[in-house]
Image (spheres, helix red, strand yellow):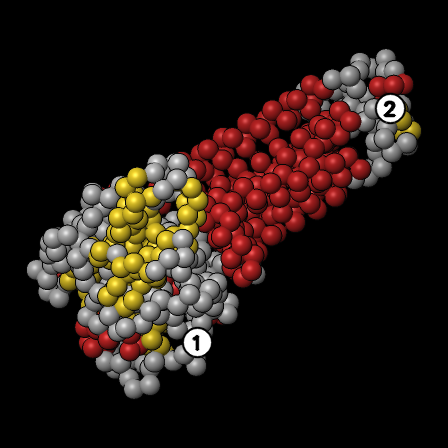
Amino acid sequence: MPCVIDTGTQTPQRAGNPWPRRLRAAIAGILAAAVALGVAELIAGLVGPNSSPVVVVGGSAIDATPRPVKDFAIRTFGESDKIALVIGTLALIVVFAIVVGLLSLRDRRIGVAGIGLFGAVGALAAFTRPTGDLLDTLSSLLGAVVGIVALLLMISALTQPAGVTTDDDDGAATESSGGGRDMVASGGVLDNLRQNLGHRDRKGVSMDRRGFFIAGGVAAGVAAVTGGAGTLIQRRFDISAARDALNIQTPADAAGAVPAGADLASEVPGLTPLFTDNADFYRVDINITVPQVSPTDWSIRIHGRVQNELTFSLADLMARDDVIERDITITCVSNTVGGGLAGSARWIGVPLRNLLDEAGVEDGADQVLTTAVDGFTIGTPTEDCLRTENAMLAFGMNGEPLPAEHGFPVRMLVPGLYGYVSATKWVVDMELTTFGEVAPYWVQREWDETAPIKLASRIDTPASVGVKAGDVMIAGVAWAQTRGIAKVEVRIDGGDWQQAELAAETNVEMWRQWRLPWRAETGQHTLSVRATDQAGEVQTEERAEPFPNGASGWHTLQVFIQ
Ligand SMILES: Nc1nc2c(c(=O)[nH]1)N[C@H]1C(S)=C(S)[C@@H](COP(=O)(O)O)O[C@H]1N2
Ligand SMILES: [Mo]
């Protein structure tokens, strides 16, 4: 560290090189931000996860992101979009912290204001979250206060006057006031703070690398310990133990064995299995962290335009004698042609139709508005909720309680509608209303009010590269919920459409596998697929982007056969 010199022995070249001091100021900024975040996580461990600045700022950012940017993020990062958001946010924080650290060298009040702003943004985000209250602002505010103290201690160690006069990068020669060689040992912590706050023009080259390293080391330690402890304490909000303790029984009205020949995945490598494992099931929602809802505290209220307002606990739902088990494929409207935002599971739950009948839906209530603990809202046409017995409030997924990621303890499902208009996870409120009265989350963001899942087909195999010439199986899945798949055809290199073999149908709400054997020759080939549903509709070639009501077009793939 060439710029750190002993009292009175500085050389002109050294004094003229401000970089090491700037580097330390930048580090001080980063450490101060780390302290603020660490302390905030610790407080969030006491107050609740919706107080954590990372969670609330991330959540607000997601809500405020313009649609094209969000589309880009989903297209580019897929299901890693949240990780990308967190990494991006951390990168921004680091840049901001460096700037704050550097500016603090010039004027400590800028540092105070910078970290203060940081805390204010967190507090505002916490307060304005759908479930936010004043208490939730505590983490960000206290984090910022401790962060400010940390920054001032480190910066003051950097600019501690120690009996030298020096030219620093700003060219101002400053007479130092002497003393305070070891800011920590000299006991002048508060003095330093006061001094530093009051003397905006005081500049001086650090005479004390120890002071900075001690302050920096303490800051790093505080950040690590508070952040680590906060993360540990926040585990108490984790519901996995309560989830494990739940026993999901197969109801009398069970889905039963799938028909023979419905799942060809064991015969065709690379083909999507008929049922998606819970662990592999795609996840789409607005949350950075998975909402944790206690199964014993959970309840849902059915109200609004109904004759009888009703409330059900999880135990109420599980004890009912009309529990059903159904095999249903669900899809996200953001799924692109050939994309993976679709999955199939065996769901256990109570038919929505029965619950709505008991509540007595009033005439004209055309929208079922559901709200979840994350503040997310979904509007579903009432007629779709009543259309099929298979629309349900589900609490079981593939024989287990719903995983936390997929809405534990209870979510809604309506076969045939994209997730954003039907599949409310962590649902706690159901209001009968009208489309004219309330616009739910994604509709406020210009997606269509109603969105039936479009007829779709996808090629899962062969892979684009690495396949050898000879007998190759082309295979994939197709779906046409509520109608069922009638036919799947494949076109190779612009030739005639060839009819693929369909796996046995599970039911019309499930996707259906298909396969077509192909004698593949070496070289580049183009494969396309299209499906026809049981109502006679042929999948359109016309390309549409996911916005505003789902993608369309044939899945076309280039494969290189070796
Ligand atoms: N509470 C809540 N429910 C939600 C969402 C959400 O953001 N919050 N996203 C919806 C969307 S857009 C889809 S596609 C499905 C995805 O369900 P999955 O994650 O279980 O696959 O959940 C729906 N339910
Ligand atoms: Mo979605």
Q: Position of residue 391 (x, y in %)?
A: 24, 67
Residue 172, percent from left and from top: 91, 32
Q: From the image, tell me which residue sits under label 2.
A: 16
Name the outermost residue toward the left: 252
Q: Residues within 10 Å of mark 2 (few under 14, many from 20)?
A: some
Q: Quadrant of residue 199?
A: top right
Quarter of the figure that contains the C terminus: top left
Residue pictured at 85% horizontal, 37% vertical: 201
Q: Is residue 101 left or right of residue 176?
A: left
Looking at the image, residue 532 lies above or below residue 235: below
Residue type for callout 2: Gly
Q: Pick the quarter of the image with the N terminus.
A: top right
Mark with earlier residue (1, 2): 2
Q: Mark 2 and mark 1 in contact (Cβ < 8 Å)?
A: no
**Residue shown at 48%/53% (left/top)?**
74
Q: Give the image location of residue 14, x and y in percent.
A: 84, 19
Q: In the image, what residue type sits under mark 1?
A: Val
